[in-house]
Image (cartoon, grey):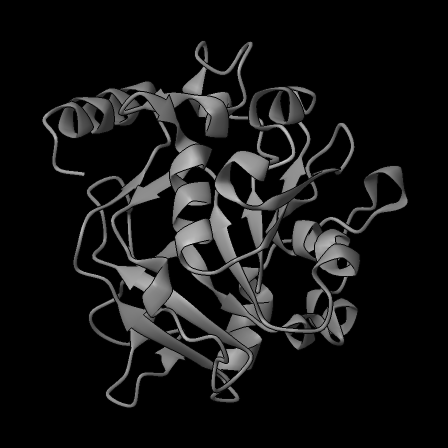
Amino acid sequence: MKALIFAAGLGERMRPLTTHTPKPLLEAGGKPLIEWHLEKLAAAGVHEVVVNTSWLAGQFPAVLGDGRRWGLRLHCLYEGDTPLETGGGMLNALPLLGDAPFLLVNGDVWTDHDFRTLPREPRGLAHLVLVDRPPQAARGDFALDADGLVRETGRPLLTYAGLGIFRPRLLDDWATIIGAHDRPGGKPRFRLPPLLTARMAEGLISGEHHRGRWTDVGTPQRLAELDAWLARGPA
């Protein structure tokens, strides 16, 4: 199985920490955030990982190497000076990901979710991990119905954890769904949620509610809190 790690963000809310370091390479618990993911991916049987990059892209291969230390084959895929957002980033990575379902995880989150429990074959086009809405979120993202399908509306609204299993076919006909979009450097730039909500209406997105630990490491304060929590030894 292959995986995609989103790591191309500019990390503007994390300044000044991200002035010289990409956010996924910031450390918590004594190692870069992205390294926690790589360890979990290797344990889950993933053998090849694509890391999409933009801001300070050269630091990723310098820090991570080729992935051999985790038993992985690592590809650092440069998107250009302008990140392509989640949808454009996934589309840009498809030639390396192939036709089979792949695991996706955001490089700027931390979770105790066991990646080994994720379905290798989602019943639809994607299987999303949802978590309870964190304090910083004005509202949730999606709801989970009794049949395990993710819906755009419902109660309670949960937050998408930036973790899931995706089929490449989710991106079929993306331009019709997205409509007008930017093309920095000639590459499409668009967000993933409109594609997900379109497929939710067709009953093609399943999900699960993870009730364990999850942190969106979006500010220096949240990074410091995660680091302190990990220092106490819960991991």
Total residue callouts = 0
Q: Is residue 214 left or right of residue 44?
A: left
Quadrant where the N terminus sits is: bottom right
- Residue 11 sits above or below residue 75 on the image: above
- Residue 49 sits above or below residue 223 on the image: below
Q: Is residue 156 left or right of residue 139?
A: left
Q: Residue 68, image x and y in percent?
A: 58, 38
Give me the residue at 56% from left, 10% from top: 20
The reply to whether residue 42 is visible in this rendering is yes
Q: Is residue 159 left or right of residue 75?
A: left
Give me the residue at 18% from left, 29% from top: 230
Q: Residue 56, image x and y in percent?
A: 65, 20
The reply to whether residue 141 is visible in this rendering is no
Give me the residue at 37% from left, 31% from top: 218
**Farthest right residue?**
186
> In terms of image quadrants, where is residue 110?
top left
Q: Residue 216, image x and y in percent?
A: 33, 39
Give me the residue at 51% from left, 85% from top: 124
Q: Is residue 223 left or right of residue 54?
A: left
Q: Residue 113, image x and y in percent?
A: 28, 55
Quadrant where the C terminus sits is: top left
- Residue 197 sits above or below residue 24 on the image: below
